[in-house]
Amino acid sequence: MKKVIFVILIFTALSGVAFAGIFSFWGKTEKTLAYETVPAKKKTISTSILATGSVKPIIGAEVKVGARISGKVEHLYANIGDKVEKDQVIAEIEKKDLEAQVAQAEANLKAADAGVGVSKASFWPALSAETDYGFQDTRYFPQKGDNFGGLKVTMPLFNGQDLYTIKQSKAVKEATKAALEFSKVQMSYATIKAPISGVIASVTTQEGETVAAGLNAPTFVTIIDLSRLQVDAFVDETDIGRVKVGQKALFTVDTYPDKEFTGKVKAIYPKAIIQENVVNFDVVIEIDDPNIELLRPDMTTSVTIYQEERMGVLVIPRAAVIKEGTNKFALVKQDSGNFEKRAIKTGMTSGSDVEVASGLNEGEIVGIKRE
């Protein structure tokens, strides 16, 4: 019985020592892990505004190509996704009637030109110098014994009916010439060319269809120049006052989440966009990234607009700053392992970092109390 009691006492003592060790370990662990430590370091920081937006063609980079005359589409040379160059033929409208009109106008011009020749021929052959008053006699009248010998004498000839006839024939010729030019212009409309270089984004008319040109020209294709894109970022009204033209911007798209594209603020729309009582302003981001060809219109973007950038400033995490009224402090680790509460002055805040203007040196360790 004495042996049993002795064993029980020994076991109890050992258990007490074990529990004391465990509690001691927990206590030390809690004390050791009470703070997370980070060093004060120098880095480049910046203030920024976050916004969402979308990729859009710039003004003039998306063109809807239509027809200015009516007729059947005889040939269509474009398909969705095709690359086209400026002035490349993309469609032709049937133009036999237009060619006939040009031929008729050319024949009328020849007839009018002949009419002018007949009118001139009815005059005296010597009358060859034309003026605003009609024709003049340009024959030489040698005069002996005076100072005008051998000089050319001009005599205005005023014949009202003859002058009217020749002017009328000339007017008919000019009108016929203008009609010919008009017919040629009309025929040129039958050949539809690309106004810009780009990619065919849509085709809305098929070969063989008849188009009717009216106030709104029927659209054949839509061409987009994918090298001329921009980002329309929607900035909240609380942040728009800090956005300025020329500020640097970075953005990502969902299809390339790990790739950042560069740009800069080009324009700020003066009128707000209100959706569901949320007021935003359209900020145009000019894209200057060499990989712009990866982008497509209407891609969703996440935009960061940078207001100010400061290089080589001393920073610590925002969580390491202790605020007491208007004063700010940081817990600085000493050689002894204890933490000293020290007053600091802060500057610009960037994300999770805050600039330390005074009170700390580079490399000093600050503590962040664990929750």
Image (cartoon, rainbow, N blue to C red):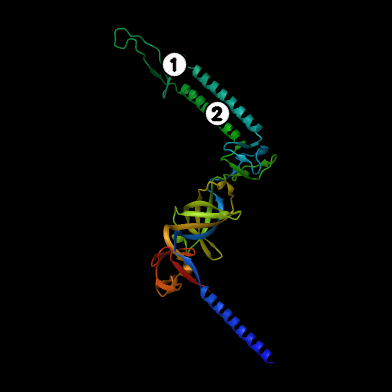
Of the numbered discs 1 and 2, the one sitting upstream in the chain is: 1
Q: Nearer the viewer, mark 1 or mark 2?
A: 2
Q: Secondary structure at mark 2?
A: helix
Q: Is residue 218 visible?
A: no
Q: Is residue 205 visible?
A: yes
- On the picture, is 202 further left or further right than 325? right
Q: Is residue 32 above or below residue 243?
A: below
Q: Is residue 208 above or below residue 23?
A: above
Labels 1 & 2 near each other (Cβ < 8 A) = no
Within the image, what quadrant is residue 300 found in? bottom right
Q: Nearer the viewer, residue 302 or 223?
A: 302
Residue 264 at x, y percent in the picture: 48, 52
Residue 172 at x, y percent in the picture: 53, 27
Residue at 49% from the left image edge and 19% from the top image edge: 120
Q: Nearer the viewer, residue 314 or 283?
A: 314
Residue 148 shows which numbered tag? none
Residue at 40% from the left image edge and 72% from the top image edge: 342
Q: Is residue 133 above or below residue 74?
A: above
Q: Secondary structure at mark 1?
A: strand
Residue 108 at x, y percent in the picture: 58, 26
Measured Cα–Cα span from mark 1 to mark 2: 26 Å
Q: Of the residues shown, which amino acid type is indicated by label 1?
A: Leu
Q: Is residue 139 above or below residue 329?
A: above
Badge 1: few (under 14), some or many (20 or more) residues near its Cα, within 10 Å?
Answer: some
Q: Nearer the viewer, residue 194 or 207?
A: 194
Residue 127 shows which numbered tag? 1
Residue at 61% from the left image edge and 39% from the top image edge: 69
Within the image, what quadrant is residue 204 found in? top right
User: Which residue is under mark 2?
Assistant: 176
Q: Of the residues shown, which amino acid type is indicated by label 2?
A: Thr
